[in-house]
Amino acid sequence: NWDRPLPSDSAQTFTYVDTQKPFSEVVDLDSVQKSLCFQVPFHAEDLLKDGYESGLKKVTLFCKFGNEAEFVPCDTLYTLPGNTAAVDSFFNFTATKGDGRYIFYTLATDSCGNVQMPIPPTDTTYVTGTPLILAINPPDESFNFADDVDAIEICFDRPVSPIDGRDWS
């Protein structure tokens, strides 16, 4: 019967202390991405200590572009409340700086506030997506490339690197 109080001399209280740091890492990231939007997969876990863990609270994705000096937080996944001991998931990442080299790492935090020690990042991907053409000017269907024209205007969905010294943006 749960509604009866226990005698004070038989009541026991247990307190578990969690000082174990959680662990996370980027896993199976393709070395080349052909789109500006792609998934960055990761694994995270709050390791058991004496049979108990507080559970993961969040995993944060850090990234940097090219030769930038600092990593910046790119996204955070907050796990379900309770004792989520492990998670295999992904971040949806958009390469806002366009084509180039992106480097990633993750940091996990458990429900007690323990934060993993950063692991030197080794997960690099190169974004080499093909830009989409949004508009071409002149749009006239009778346009013939054999005609002598001074300029053709092409509008892409993002900046495009110059080719042969010409500005193709």
Image (cartoon, helix red, strand yellow):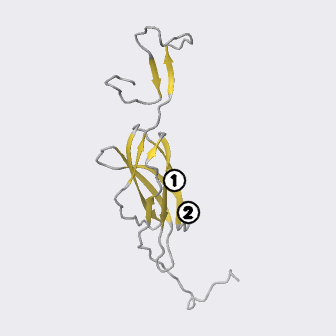
Image point (41%, 67%), residue name: 114
What amino acid is found at the position of numbered circle 2 in the picture? Answer: Pro
Q: Which residue is mark 1?
A: 90
Look at the picture and state if 24 lies above or below 9: above
Q: Which residue is mark 2?
A: 81
Q: CA distance from mark 2 to mark 1?
A: 18 Å
- Pick whichever of labels 2 and 1 is earlier in the sequence: 2
Circle count: 2
**In the drawing, does residue 130 fall left or right of residue 7?**
left
Q: Quadrant of the C terminus?
A: top left
Look at the picture and state if 135 lies above or below 10: above
Image point (54%, 86%), residue name: 12
* Residue at the far left in the pictured view: 69
Image point (34%, 59%), residue name: 120
| Crowd band around label 1 with a 10 angstrom C-alpha radius: few (<14), some (14–19), many (20+) | some
Image point (31%, 24%), residue name: 165
Q: Quadrant of the N terminus?
A: bottom right
Query: Where residue 125 appears, x then y in whole percent?
Result: 41, 47
What amino acid is found at the position of numbered circle 1 in the picture? Answer: Phe
